[in-house]
Image (spheres, rainbow, N blue to C red):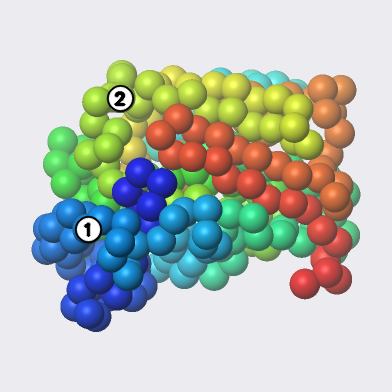
Amino acid sequence: MLESDLLVDMHEATNGILPEKLIDFLEQSEQNMQLASQILQLTAEDKSVYPLNEVRLLAPLPAPKSFRDFYAFEQHVKSARENRGLKMIPEWYQIPVFYFSNHLAIKGPEDKISMPMDCNWLDYELEVACVIGKQGRNISAEEADEYIFGYCILNDWSARDLQRQEMKVGLGPAKGKDFATSIGPWIITKDELEHCKSRKGFDITMKAKVNGALLSEGNMKDIYYSFAEMIERASAGVTLYPGEIIGSGTVGTGCILELGTEVHRWLQPGDVVELEIDKLGVLKNSIVNDEVR
């Protein structure tokens, strides 16, 4: 857990009372957060406190129980469809839609992203994710906030040429998405964004850079469907469990597919992608060839 520029090892600080892994911490998130709040009274002299610049951050939730990614920003949907010669469909305005991705292919900050075999159109996607911290079923939008533990940056890496081929069949995206999803650099608890609430989202700027050049810039407050509405949809007739991740979908201008290759070519090995969101930090990854591990 982060406190300013320090990192507190909660498992160590409580002599093993708090779980070592976040996925286990989330099982009893409300009780565990109460204890964690007390531990944050520690000072830099305590053995369980480390300067952030002396540690290597991994994915904060490396094996979530599931990963649903929604399609909740209107600008992105419109632009991406226009680029394929398609008009908006009325059904998009009727229900928030999502797909399941590979929850066992989660990457963290500074992790290398292997370019999939047979992929020539590699893309990033600038998103926010929420983490479920409480079990629930048939959750209404009005009560959904009770089930959110926190938020983080999410990069939904996309092999656009593989995605394009498979979706012509009428299913997907699947193989165009299953190779990697980055989250991090940390998860902030929902109370830390409470003062930023605006419309259906939060007034936080979202940016993406490739090799230091700014390509994407948006704001999370422009989201069409709130996370509460997404949770209502996801939990209809289905139980959500602590440790599941829900993605917002891509913010407007938040990927090369939407911007067009005249703005920037598809990603290649050697490229460095940085996603930066107010309050949530910077999530940085580099692209490598698939054979490089």
Q: Residue at x 44, y 56 (%)?
A: 51
Expressed as whole percent of the image width and height from the top left, the position of residue 241 reads 28, 64
Q: Nearer the viewer, residue 76 or 18?
A: 18
- Quarter of the image containing the N terminus? bottom left
Q: What is the distance, in whole Å, between disc 2 and disc 1 at their CAs?
A: 28 Å
Q: Residue furthest bottom?
A: 16
**Residue found at x 20% / y 43%:** 144
- Residue sitting nearer the eye, 242 or 29: 29
Circle 1 residue = 42
Foreground label between 2 and 1: 1
Percent position of residue 229, x then y: 30, 37
Task: Give the residue drawn at x 30%, y 61%.
Answer: 45
Would you place residue 171 above or below residue 93 in this image? below
Q: Quadrant of the C terminus?
A: bottom right
Residue at the image position 87 percent from the left and 23 percent from the top: 262
Amino acid type at mark 1: Leu
Picture quarter containing residue 265?
Answer: top right
Q: Foreground: 88 or 72?
A: 72
Q: Residues within 10 Å of mark 2 (few under 14, many from 20)?
A: some
Q: Check whether the beta carbons of the residues at disc 2 and disc 1 lie within 8 A of each other.
A: no
Q: Tag 2, which secondary structure? A: helix
Residue located beneath label 2 in the image: 196
Query: Looking at the picture, which amino acid does disc 2 mark?
Result: Cys
Q: In which quarter of the view is residue 142 placed?
A: top left
Q: Which mark is residue 52?
A: none
Category of crowding for the residue at label 1, using alpha-carbon neighbours closer than 10 angstroms: few (below 14), some (14–19), many (at least 20): some
The answer to which image quadrant residue 263 occupies is: top right
> Where in the figure is residue 248, as x and y percent of width and height?
45, 39
First in residue order: circle 2 vs circle 1: 1
In the image, is residue 147 above or below residue 202?
Answer: below
